[in-house]
Structures are given as structure tokens and as C-alpha cells.
Amino acid sequence: MSPGTTPNPGPTLPREDNVVGSNSVSDISSATPTSDATPTSSATSAPEISSEPDGFTTLPDPQVHVFEVTAIRTYVSQSNEELANVALLRHGLLGCSPLYPEVAFSLDVLEFYHRLRRRHPRLGIQPFVRALCDVQDVNYTSTQRRQFSATFDTYLAILRRIEKRCSAALRRDTANWRMRNSCPACTLQLQDEPPLKPERLFAIDGNNSAKWVATAGREDPRTFESDYFLPRHVVDKYKDEVKRKIQPVLKNNSDENEAPGEAPDGQDNPTPCTERWKASAAEHEKRALNIYETTGIFACACRHGFVQRACEMVRSGELAKYGLAIVDDAITVHGCDTGCGYDIGCSFSETVKKSPLVRDRAATARMEFVVCAFHGYAHNRLCQLSYHPLYRAGYGIEDLETMERVFAASNNVARIIRYASPFHWMQSLDLHFQQWDEDKYAELGNFLLNNYKQCLRIIAENTVEVAQLTTELKIEEGVFREWLEQEKTFLSGLREPPEEQVLESAQKLERVRHQWVVVTNAQEPDYNSDARRTRRIEAARRSAFDELTLAIQAVGDLEVRLEVDNPWTPTHPKYQETLSRIQHREFHRALDRVQQLVMQRLLELSKANMSGMVTTGYKMRTSIWKGLKARAKAIRAALKRYNKLASEMQPPAPALYWKDVVNYTFISEFDLLRSAYTHRDVMSSPWTIPRNREVAAKYFKLLAAKDELPRLNREVRRLHTSLELEQKEYAHAIRTYADTDPHLTAELRARYHSRRRIHKIHLARIAAIHALPGYTGCTDRDTADDSDVLDDETQSAELNRLAKFLEKAY
């Protein structure tokens, strides 16, 4: 604004269209700003701008204040009873301050950046303002960035007020309405639909990309309230829910990579999964850098991708309290029969059982926990048999890896919020999750169509293959479940070798006893001539006696717990047998190393083959292929060491070759190989034969595909019904406010127009599903009152044409 042309701020009038501040905006009754340069229908009609060519200007009315906005070099009239920003808004502009704006930005520019930010979260304010300066041919300054940031915050606040008023008009302002209704396929209950167990499928997980530096943005005192995030004080209620373990004293270990993990808090004994997952470790092992206040987010989403709830991870890793808070909130909102996928679902289920606040609610709500499908193949085989969704009824072909996709998108936001203020950190993630949910709703019909096609394809292919293989191998389909139980029984017996614990305790006791004897029988010193040596020997005796006492107590406790009748001595047969087995530990460690490298190779191959790899950055692609090349060399070296040790075993262990290892796809192959040497009789069992295991895998995938169809049939009908119900809601709200609030009515009509565009796609994809050969659901939907539906229903002919087009496109 030019000097000497200060606008009149005007009184703060009690009208709904007054903007009273950059941070707090009163309700406005208007439609969302349109792409036209002229003001929207909600604003007061603007007087004609009195500007003439060649710099000549007509003098305004003496009762009207005129001020110049330098950004667009035009004159804006302002009456005595108007705020400066009200006058600007009538001309499609918004000032950077509430009372005396020196710079104003077009609503079109603000909406354009709003849409760009939602679609491309990595685009920060600074590069956008620099681009505006380039277009206007002016020099960029940091002041312009701050001005645009303040104006954009105000614009978003206006949009939130509009959203609040529209939600109230549509009766969507009740508590937890978004969680209960954002995904119609999961939450819309119809009267005559058959029950499913579980009723709905969710996924939870943590991500440490969305960090926030503790010292950044402290000058901004504002707080942002998001419907997606649980407050910190709510999450902290669960911080003492699990029993914390005493932090062990760290010892020097020459082979740190081989050290086993510690049992997580709330779990008595460590499991093999503890060694493979950082999230499953004890709480004291989950540390974060001190420079970060927020070290990431922990979130939950339904199987269709709609974000349900999230919380901040504060100065820590993936602690149990975050998962407990999210699970407890999901039980409160959604009720019973929920299946939850988590990459450490095996250990987290034990944590829930130990939580005083959650365990009873989870048991009453019949909450189930499984491991995600892709992560599950890196768990030990016994864990897979109990927690992998492939072997659990009701989960179908769902992989429950939803959070990996959510975080892959939210990582783009993390790049620009690490040094933001707490207000902007939360606002950016909230804006991203809103756009994410809108995209998931637009893709919901395509999700159901693709899943239905996949199920029909699996059924068509695997039915023939399983029938051929069962005939060839002369087995019946019912035997696959029996094999599963036999394998589970066998692996359960191998889960904890107590003999090794007894042997280690016995060896330690013998060592300490020998040390005590040596110290006790030492030559008696001359106390008068050698006081220093005397004190040293006495200290050694006291230390040896303490160690002997502790070792005796430890051996006694272990013998009672494991019901060992006779103490083990070096001549005991069990002692000798267990000692021989422990001498093979180097062999098992060599096999573990091969397993680790092969699993890392599989993870890198999955990245290389995932959709979107073509658009992945050059550095990412280069890093992946370098990793694969280095992994191949490491595998060959590990195989060489393993084969050397295998040949020295008595009897020799089976050798491994490169051509065999590269075909290993699941960790169960290594678990079976590890057990095969010490339990050679197990290799005669039918479930260990590779050909039989291949048939069993196809059989369970066939069952999963058949299990998925009833869920898809229900979700297709729910989506179909929700389209009519939403149309009815908009029609009722538009008719209700048509006479009393035309501005709100205009906004509702504009929103319904956008939703109807998505509805047409949904209807076409539903029609394509109904036309699939093999569709087993009903084609009708739950009825609604046609008298309250807008008269813009798409004709059947249009839907059929659109369905055929989509069938070709997808």
C-alpha cells in the first residue's frame, strides 16, 4: 500500500461476513471462492471500480474511502462502516493483516496454492512466492513470504469455518462423525446384511519421518486442533500401562549383530520376532535424538485407506502407549469385532493383554491382532501360523499394509514441516490427511472392482491347480489343515530349548566354584609385610563368594522352574548331549546370516518391482540397485562360510547353493532347514515336502479369495446405498436453507456438484462389478425415500457407457 493511503479499518460490525482477524475468523455465509476473478455470490455487490486508462482516475464519492493495493495496482472502495478486509473480499482479495493490510492476495491465487499444496505437499510457501515474484517481475524478499503465509493461514481458517457450517447443515457435526462415516464400505450398517467376523479391518503402525525440531517455531503461540489427532494428554494415560523392564547394563560384545533382542514391555519372555523388529523391542531401547520434540506419528487407517486416528510420538520411538491409545479409541468409536493388522501384531497382542486399561475392553470387543501380510513373512514360521492373515478366517486377500501406503504419501509432507511451528506442523498434516481421504473416497469403487477381479482370477486359477495337484499327489483338501496343525505342534516344541539354559547355568556354577576354590586355597599372606596384596586377595574372595551365591540361587530357581530333578554336572548325560548341540552354534549363526541377507534382498527387490518405480527418483533407484549388487556378494560370502561349517558337522549338514537360495521366498524355508539338522525325522513328514507345501500355499490362497467375496459383496452394496443416502442428505439441507440462507445453499450446491462427479464414477464401477461373470452379490441397494432426492440422477444408458469405458481403462 502506498504511503499516505491508509485505509479506514472501520468498526467491527456484528455481521457474519466481517473478517475480524488473521487468526480468528467469524462465520461467513458464502460459497467457496470460485475461479472467476469477480467476487462470489455471497459477497456484497461491489461498486464499479473507477479507473481510467493512461493513469487518469475519476474521483470517488467523498463518503467512500479509497486505498491502493500495490500487488495489482487497482483501487478498492471502502465505506465508513466496512473493515478493510471486507472491502478487499468484495473484490476477490484478502489482506495479510486484519486491520491495516499493506499487501493483498487474490483469492484465486490462494485457492490455487491451496490445491497445489494438497496435491503436492512438498511445495512450500517460499518457492511458490518466489514464482509469483517472477511472474510479477519483482524482487523476492522474506517479508513477502511471511505476508503470504499469514494470508494463507487466514484463508484456511475461513475454509474451516465454512466446513463447520456445512457440516452442521448436513448434520455431520456430532462427535467422531468422520471416523464413523468417512468410509461407507466399512461403517454403513444395512439391516439385512449377514454378519462377518471380523466386522471391519484396520491397520496401525508408526512412522518416524514427520519429525519436528524442538526449538523451531516457538515464537508462534497458536495451537491447531485436528480431528485426526489424539491430544497428548489422552495418549499419556497409557504410558504406565505395561510393566517396564529394568534397563540392562550394556556389555561389550564382539558380535553385536548376533545378540538376541530383549522381550518388549508387557511380555514375559522374548520371542524370535523380538530379534527382527525394532518396534517389538523393550521401551528403553526405543530412543530418539534429543533435538526433536515430535519424532513421528502413530496412525490407524481402515483397509480402504481412510485415516481414522493419529497421535504424535513425543521424544521417543514406537512406544506401546501409542498403539494402546489408538486401539482403545477405535473400540470406543467402532465397537466390537475389529481385526487389526500391525507389523508386530504378535507381540502387541500380548502387550494389550497386560494393559489394565485396555485388556478388558479389547476382550469384550473381541479385538483381533494379526501381522501384516508382507511383514508377516519376515516373522518366524510359528508366528506366521498363528498371526498371518492368510491362515486366519475372515481376512480374505487383504494384506493390511495400508499404513505403508499412507506413510509413503505423508513422507512428502515431512520435508517441509520439520522446522515449522507446532501450529503449521499440525495444520499441514491435517490438510494432507483431508486430501488423502478425499482421494481414497474417489478410488473406493476402483478398489472394490480390482479386488473382485483379483478374487475371481485366484479362484479360477487355483481351483484347477489345486485339483490337479491333489489328484497327482493322491491327497484330499481336508489334509491341509491337519498339516498346519502338525507343523504348529512341531515348531511349538522347538520354541524354547530349556536344556541350553540349564547347561549354561551349570557351566557358570562350575566356573564360579573353581574360582572360589582357587581364591580360597591361595597362600596365606603375611598381613604385616604385604597389606596391599592382602586387601586384594580379600576383595577377590568376597567377589568370588558373592558370585558363587548368586550362581547357586540362579541354578536353583531354574531347576525349580524347569522341573529338573537332578542337578547337572559335567558327567551328566544331558549335560554332554546339550554341550554337543551348543557346539553347533556357529553353524546356526552362519545359517542365520544367510537368512538375514536373503530377506534383505527380498525387501529390496520388492522396492524395485513396486508400482511407481518408474517415477522414483534417480538416487533411489541407484541406491536400490547398488544394495542388490552388494547383497549378492555378501550372500555368496555367507554361503561359502555356511557350506564350510556344514561339511564339518557330524553327520554333515545339507549344503546350500546360490541357485537354491535365490528362490527362497519365505523365512519359513530357513526355519525348516534349521530344524532339519537336529530333527532329521521331521523331514519324512508330508508337510515338509516342498511339493506339498506349494499345494498347501495355493489352497490357502484359494480359501482367502473365497473368503473375500462375501465382504466385497457387502461393501459394494454399502457403497451403492451410501450414494443415494448422501444425495438425500444434500437435498434435505439445500431445501432447508434455500429461503433462509442462500449463501450457505449456494455452497452446498457447489459441494454436491463435486460429489456428484465422483458418484458417477462409483455408479459406473458398481455396474461393472455387477456385470462381472462370477459376481455372487445382489444388485439392489437399500431403499431410500425418492421424494427427497435431487432430480439429477444419471441415466442408466450413461452409466453403462461409462462402465464400458472404465472396464477398458482399468
Image (tube, rainbow, N blue to C red):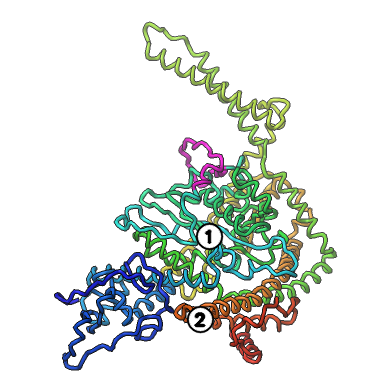
Residue 546 in the image: above or below residue 9? above
Residue 250 in the image: above or below residue 203? above
Q: Nearer the viewer, residue 396 or 56?
A: 56
Query: Magenta part of the protein: which range?
Result: 236-265
Q: Position of residue 188 (x, y in %)?
A: 65, 69
Question: Which residue is denoted by mark 2 in the rendering?
Answer: 738
Residue 529 - label: none
Q: Position of residue 479 (x, y in %)?
A: 82, 59
> From this viewpoint, is residue 338 visible?
yes
> Is 276 left or right of 703, judged from the image as shown?
left
Residue 309 - label: 1
Q: Nearer the viewer, mark 2 or mark 1?
A: 2
Q: Nearer the viewer, residue 659 or 486?
A: 486
Q: Nearer the viewer, residue 274 or 323?
A: 323
Residue at the image position 29 percent from the left and 86 percent from the top: 47
Q: Quadrant of residue 761?
A: bottom right
